[in-house]
Every structure is written in structure tokens, then in C-alpha cells.
Image: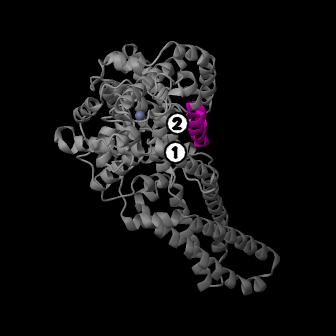
Amino acid sequence: MLPSGSDSQQRSLENPDKQTMRVDSTKRNDKMIEVPRKKLNMRLYTQSEQKFQDIVNSKLVTISIIALVGAYAILIFIIVALEELLDETQFNNVSSILSWIELGILIVFIIEIFVGLYAWGIKKYYKDKWLILDTLIILLSLFFVIFELADQKTSNVIKVIQAVFRFLRIFLLIRKAQTFRRLATISTISTPAEKIVRFLAELKEVLEDENMKLDIDYCIDKIGNNQLYQMGKLDEDNAEAMAWLNQSQQGRTEVKRILTNDQQQQQQKKVIANFQKLNIPKRLLDILYKQHDDLYIDPFECDKLSGGEGLVNLMLFFFENYNLFDVFLIKPKVVRGYFEEVMKGYLDNPYHNKVHAQDVAQTCNFLLSKCKFIEIGQLDEQDIACVLIAGAIHDYGHPGLTNAFLINSRNELALTYNDQSVLEMYHPSQCFKIAWGNQKVNIFENLQFHKYRRIRESIILMVLSTDMAHHASELAITNSRVAAPDFEPNGKDKQRLMDLIVHSSDVSNPTKSFEIYKQWTEKVLSEFWLQGDKERDLGLPISYLCNRYTTNTAEAQVGFIDYVVKPTFACVLGFLPAYEPFFQNLDKNKAKWQELIEFYKQQLASIQPK
Ligand SMILES: [Zn+2]
């Protein structure tokens, strides 16, 4: 039989050696609420006691006891029936066999009681007062059976007492049957929430502290009414932040720390205060609360609102949002320092500059968060950090010239990296040097070595994946993986998909609003044309799209969408179904460029080479 509250004790007090209990933790914030154990006023069990509790509570033992109770009921029925049907001599002949069987069953019940007493202790075991009566009935039944076996000739008084006890044994059977019903309830409970509510109710029974009982009532109420993730009233001063908090918590299924209303409001204020401590300009912070995972955020506006430090502020926001300060064990000032250095390393190119880096990091976050790659790839905080950092550093020190130009012009970078993914090798190499060259900005310094190795490898792979030279071959492999029966977005294919997240973000301009897209197009072509001018001056062949006198902007974009961007995002759509509503932007934007082809033709006709 199960003393009430045994399940919850067993689960809560797993480690009797611990001086404090882990009451709850959230996935995002792994800090524990430490509750001194004496406050709970609960007994901690030794490992062997817990083992016996497990045995008594096990399905096998419970079902065996129930089966034995059934057998005992049949036995009593047979004894009563035979006593009525047979004469005294016939009955005496069979009764000793039946008494031996009864003795065996009663001994098993006695053993069960002793194991229970050992496992829970007398006080807890007999907290259910009915168990005292059960024990008494079993002991007296045992006494009468032994008495019967020792002396067949019983007096009439003893016979009456025996009859009374047989009645009481039926009562005992009903009690046992209740245990059976309880077992059936456990196995048919349909949701974890119902189980948690039941465990909490049992926990409440064994607690003596009235305040803690009230807290448990609060928990049961919130779980029962499905209000776990509902915020308290909005703080009007922080309406943007509170709306973001509410929105960012929608649909999250992990167990949250269960808090009272006051605690909840304190928690919200703390979260907002943490963001405010980062010194992100207020207007930018308000935009990030609303749009940090939005495809249509305006990157130029974000950069302007932060005085040209959009990249730094965006990365600080992400570090706080994903709890990465705790993952990297660093202070915000180290992160700020690091990304300030990264930002300074971006040259003032028309396109490959710090705003492009900020835009790619933010688009990565759109795919991670809004398109649910975090859930689909089961990304942990380290994975998230890798993707966002890779996005931020992926074009560090970009000279505004392509790999082909660097190789053809025998540039020092091409010599250093042996003409292989020259810039994609250079960007992460420089960014790791920034960290290890200055302790004050080294975001990797406090990571354990194996974690650092994993993060470094992942970031480098993602930046290398942005080399357009490998675009077609890598995309073909990723497409075949996505279609494969053993595709594992959260396992062996995760890194490949993370690579694609960064690469697709890098070519994502055509998926955005046409207004933003057109600005990026003008910037990238003006950078290409500057390279074309250089090639012309050096007598080198002018690269594709780099001739300002022949490149039709609109035609170039139609081709870019058809041959690069659409196949890339079709692959993304293959494993991120939430991307679907945004995929159609490509056709809409392509149609707009098609309408402009004639306009750009006329524009080209009006300009002549010098
Ligand atoms: Zn880029």
C-alpha cells in the first residue's frame, strides 16, 4: 500500500546528501532557487530507503499484491461457503489446508507492511490512519489462523470472533482495491500538467509550513487554469519591452519557474533592467524588442539610431536575449569591447560594411527564431551564439573586392590563403585574432577548451560556407540531405543547416521589402563597379556584373533571384516550413525588377565609357 505523498517525496528528494533542494530551473536561465531544506520540514530518505520505496511503488509489486488480495477474497469466500455446505467433519478435513494457504498470504501482507515501515518510517507510513487498522486486522487474522492450526476444536466464542474477522478482512480488501484504483489513475493520467498537479497536491499534504502550502495552491491554480505564461499587468513605462516579453514567451513549452504575481512582476522588471544596463540607445532598444526577429526590420534605421553602432548593439541585445553572457561567462563590457573591435574592422565599402554584417546577423536571428530553426534543429545556446557571431563577423575586413580579383591581382591575402576561399578564410581568422590579442575583449576566454573548440569550428565552417564558389555544390548536397530518409536537422545535419542559415542570410536581400532590397542592390552594384573600374585600370578582364557600362541592374537582379536566391530559400523552406509566407517575396520583387529592365536599358544607353 502507498502512504499518501510518497510519490512526490520520492521525486523531490532524490539526493539525500544535498543540503538544498533544486526546486525548479528554467531552460534559459539555469540558476537554481535554493531552498534551505529545514524550511520545507520534510524528511530526507537514504538511498536504501528510496530503493525500497521504489520497489513497493513499482507496478510489478502493486499488481502482485492486488492479485494476492483477489486470491485472498476467493479463499475467504470458499471458507465461508464450505462452512455452510459441508458438515463439521468434512469441513475440518479441508479447513487445515485452507488455513495454511491463508497463513501464507497473511505472511506476505505482513512483509509488505514491514518493508513499507522501513521505507517511509512509522510516522509517514501511518499518516494514513486506515493503515493502522489494516495492520491490526492482518495481525489479528494471523493470530486466529495460527490458533486455528494449533487447535482444531474451537469454542463457539472463537468461531463468532473468526466470523467477525472474516467480515473485517473484506473491509481490508476494499482498502486494497482503492490502492488498485489509484494505480489505474496513475497509468491513465493524460498530460504532464495533470501529473504535476497531483504531485503538488501530494507534496502539500506532507508540508507543515502554511506559507509553502499557499504557494503550492497558487502553483496548482496557475497550472490548472493554464496561466503559466501569462504576464501580470503591463508596466506602462516599458510597454514595448513588456509586449516583447509577452510575445517572446508565447508558444514556449519548456517548464518556467513558477512565480507568484509579485515575483512575476519583479522578474519582468529584472529582465527589462538587464537590457537597459546594456546601454543600447532607447529608440533602438524599443525597435529590437519589437523586431529583433522580423524580416522587415530596417537595418539602416537601426544603425542610424545607434550612432553608427548598430552591429555592437544588436549583438549585445542577442547576448542578453539568449542568455549568452552566462554561456560565455563574460560581462557585457567584454562583449561590447569585442564587437566594437569587429565593427571597426569593417571598411567603409558601399556594400560589404558593418551594416551588412548587422543585417546578416539579424536575418540569421529571423531564421532561428521566427522561422523556428532553434526548435527544429534543437539548437542549444552555444549553437545560437555560433550562428549569430558567424553572421556578425562573416565579412570582417572585406576589401570591397572579390576573391577572383584578389587572386588575379596577386593580392597578399590570396598568397596567404593559397587562393582558397581567400576572404572567407581571412574574416574569421582576423576575428579570432582580435579576441586572443586583447584579453579585455576576449569573449572566448572563459570557455572550457572543448566548448571553445566546438564554437570555433562551427563559426569557421559557417563563414566558409558564404563563399559563393561553393554555393551550387553545397546547395546540391544540402538539398539531397533534406530529402534523405535519414535527414536529422537536430543531429548529423545540424551544422550543414547552420551553414545554410548564415549563407542564405548573406544573400537574403531579395527576400526583404523592395524598398530595403533596392537600397542594398544599388550599394552592391556600386561596389562591384568600383572593382570593375580597378580591373579596367589594371588591364585585367572585367568580372561579371562589374562593368558599370554594361550591367543592367534589373536584369542582374532577376538572374540573381532565379539562379541563386530562390534555389537557396527553396532549400531553407524544405526544413523550415515557417518560412513559407516570406518565400513569395522573391517572385513579387522579381516582377518589380522585370518592370524596370527597360528603364535601366535606357539609363545604360545614356552613359558612355570615358
Ligand atoms: Zn556578406
Q: From the viewer's perspective, is 563 left or right of 15?
A: right
Residue 443, above or below 287: below
Which residue is outermost to the right?
85
Viewer-proximal residue among 415 and 124: 415
- Cβ at disc 1 under 8 Å from ligand 1: no
* SS type, badge 2: helix
- Main SS of the magenta part reads helix
Circle 1 residue = 196
Is residue 499 one of those drawn in magenta? no
Viewer-proximal residue among 573 and 378: 573
Label 2 crowd (10 A; few <14 / some 14-19 / many >=20): some
Instruction: Write the start and end of the magenta stretch as one range.
Output: 560-579
Quarter placement of the N terminus? bottom right
Task: Mark 1 and mark 2 in contact? Answer it, CB < 8 Å.
Answer: yes
Q: From the viewer's perspective, is 255 left or right of 320?
A: right
Residue type at numbered disc 2: Ile
The disc label shown at residue 223, or none: 2
The disc label shown at residue 504, or none: none
- Residue 421 in view in this figure: yes
- Residue 142 location, x and y as percent? 56, 74
Residue 7, above or below 162: above
- Residue 531 location, x and y as percent? 38, 29
Label 1 crowd (10 A; few <14 / some 14-19 / many >=20): some
Q: Residue at x 30, y 30 (%)?
A: 346
Q: Residue at x 44, y 26 (%)?
A: 524
Distance between mark 1 and mark 2 Cα atoms = 8 Å
Q: From the viewer's perspective, is 428 left or right of 195?
A: left
* SS type, badge 1: helix
- Residue 116 location, x and y as percent? 47, 65
**Residue 579, quarter of the rendered image:** top right
